[in-house]
Image (spheres, grey):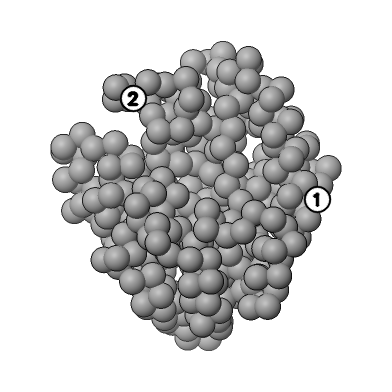
Amino acid sequence: MSKLPFQLGIHPINWVGEDVKEHGDDTTCAQILDDIQRLGLTGTEMGRKYPTDPATLREELSKRNINLISQWKSVLISDPAYRQAELDDYRRHAEFLQSMGSKVISTAEVGGSLHFDPRRTPNEKEVLRLSDAEWHVLAEGLNQAGAIAQEYGLKLTYHHHGGTVVEQPEEIDRLMELTDPSLVYLLFDTGHAYYGGADPLEVLRKHYDRIAYIHLKDIRPDVLEQARAEQSDFVGCIRRGVFTVPGDGCIDFEPILQELITRGYNGWAMLEGEQDPAIHNPYEYAKRSLSYMESLYQASLKTSN
């Protein structure tokens, strides 16, 4: 069981890929949840191997003392033609998460992205960055989605994400500037911050007051450098093994953890690896990562005494 001062869970993406479907595709829901229970963790996000029926899912989670913390929700809100349908779908998503006892919705705009935007064609190579007008449309739509989330006792936590239009540090800044802080929160992801060209610690410090949820993920810099040199896209980077769990890459989690402790963060953070489970055993990597995080915490206690 985690001894960290905030609530630590783990994402099923460590076992089964979401963007790279062949990663762990033969893994079952029971395998994932049994491993999470063995790790002593009590929080998870929705994964594609989990049952979608709320009653069945609740039963599988409760018998292992695991809570559903959130579920990813793609939105295409930067295009006014899609907004109403997207908001209607967002409400259904909020209803489901409320029924599961969740408090946050992991939300990301897919407009302009290569792999998620339904308007894109397979032969395109670049993320289409938003125009000024699209930025304002997106912000207005996210405020509306955030208001829907609030109706269900949830917070919209925006997931800045590789391969999307809110990826780079200045894009995170702009999103936070344009949206209502009482309606739109930030999902701070260490790995995606680094991937997008930011210093994760700087993002954490700059936007801490907006952060309502966290993903803890690491980066293999040599893999990222080679992938970028070969102009690999985001999904290609995942296939190459750009991401890994905290303690196995280049991100220094000591000051990040210290910042969270100092500021009294008491929300949920998800341990993430998002790599091929056939090569990187999810349970073993998670176990080592937990030991790494807890050693940092113990060291911080000695320093503060």
Distance of mark 1 from mark 2, alpha carbons?
Answer: 38 Å
Q: Amino acid at mark 2?
A: Pro
Q: Nearer the viewer, residue 45 or 259?
A: 45
Q: Position of residue 284 (x, y in %)?
A: 36, 77
Q: Quadrant of residue 24?
A: bottom left
Residue 253 in picture, x, y percent from top left:
40, 65
> 220 left or right of 134?
left
Mark linked to residue 153:
1
Front-most of residues 272 and 90: 90
Callout 2: SS: loop
Label 1 sits on a secondary structure element that is loop
Quadrant of residue 144 within the rendered picture: top right
- The residue closer to the viewer here, 261 or 284, is 284
Rendered position, 76 above or below 148: above
- Give the number of the mark in front: 1 or 2: 2
Q: Is residue 159 visible?
A: yes
- Asked if the residue at tag 2 contacts the one at tag 1, i.e. Cβ–Cβ closer than 8 Å, the answer is no
Tell me the amino acid under the disc marked 1: Gly
232 over 50 or under it: above or below:
above
Q: Is residue 65 left or right of residue 290?
A: right
90 in relation to 31, above or below: above
- In the rendering, which numbered label is found on residue 122? 2
Classify the position of the N terminus by image quarter: bottom right
Horizontal side, residue 223 vs residue 150: left or right: left
Quadrant for residue 14, please give it: bottom left
Q: Does residue 146 appear in this view? A: no
Q: Is residue 43 above or below residue 221?
A: below
Total marks placed: 2
Where does the image place residue 159, in percent across and percent down from the top left?
54, 44
Residue drawn at 66 percent across, 28 percent down = 86
Point 31% across, 22% down: residue: 124
